[in-house]
Image (spheres, grey):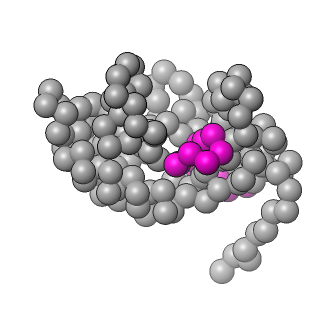
């Protein structure tokens, strides 16, 4: 069994990512949920039960999530992509935590990390089988329990 590694400072974030290898990470504004968004009732970023309408492929009646390997919750797999995504957050000058998970982790059935065909280092947590919105919510809750967090990780980016 490999020894457990403990990191004491945020400046080792790049080293952590490269050592862990197959890690997927996602910056989140401090205090926000790692897999759900605050409710928004209109516009491009409208949400249904905390899931953004633009992140997943919804059925016409918005009761079902349909499989699509190029849609899903966004994750970064490289230091460069993580820095780029964090740059979008830094415009708001809000503190950011970095949530991460090993991609080999026990991801619930019906979900899978899929590489973005148009952006190297960017991955989607995609839906692979048709499911009710409530089922996706339950699965994203399970994913959120498996995520580790580097609080204030944005300072290292």
Query: Residue 18: x percent and y percent?
Result: 73, 48
Q: Residue 45 lies in what quarter of the image?
A: top left
Camera sees residue 13 = yes
Q: Residue furthest bottom?
A: 1
Compared with 121, 142 (above or below) is: below
Is 2 or 49 nearer to us in this picture? 49
Q: Is the N terminus in the top left, top right, bottom left or bottom right quadrant?
A: bottom right
Identify the residue at horizontal 86%, vertical 48% (top origin): 11
Query: Nearest the camera: 66 or 135?
Result: 135
Q: Residue at left 24%, top 51%?
A: 134
Q: Which residues are magenta?
A: 19-34
Q: Is residue 32 magenta?
A: yes
Q: Is residue 135 left or right of residue 87?
A: left
Q: Is 97 colored magenta in this rendering?
A: no
Q: Residue furthest left?
A: 61
Q: Residue 147 at what x, y percent from top left?
A: 55, 58
Side of 86 where 113 appears, left or right? left
Quadrant where the image shows the C terminus: top right
Which one is in front, 43 or 85? 43
Image location of residue 61, percent across then percent down: 13, 31
């Amino acid at each position: 069994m490999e020894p457990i590694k403990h990191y004491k400072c945020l400046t080792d974030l790049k080293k952590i990512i490269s050592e862990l290898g197959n890690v997927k990470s996602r910056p989140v504004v401090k205090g926000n949920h790692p897999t759900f968004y605050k409710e928004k009732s209109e516009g491009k970023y409208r949400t249904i039960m905390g899931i953004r309408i633009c992140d997943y492929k919804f059925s016409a009646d918005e009761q079902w999530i349909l499989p699509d390997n190029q849609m899903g919750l966004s994750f970064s797999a490289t230091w460069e992509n993580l820095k780029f995504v964090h740059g979008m957050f830094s415009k708001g000058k809000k503190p950011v935590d970095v949530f991460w998970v090993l991609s080999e982790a026990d991801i619930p059935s019906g979900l899978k990390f899929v590489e973005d065909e148009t952006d190297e280092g960017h991955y989607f947590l995609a839906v692979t089988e048709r499911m009710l919105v409530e089922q996706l919510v339950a699965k994203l809750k399970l994913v959120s329990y498996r995520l580790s967090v580097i609080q204030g990780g944005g300072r290292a980016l």
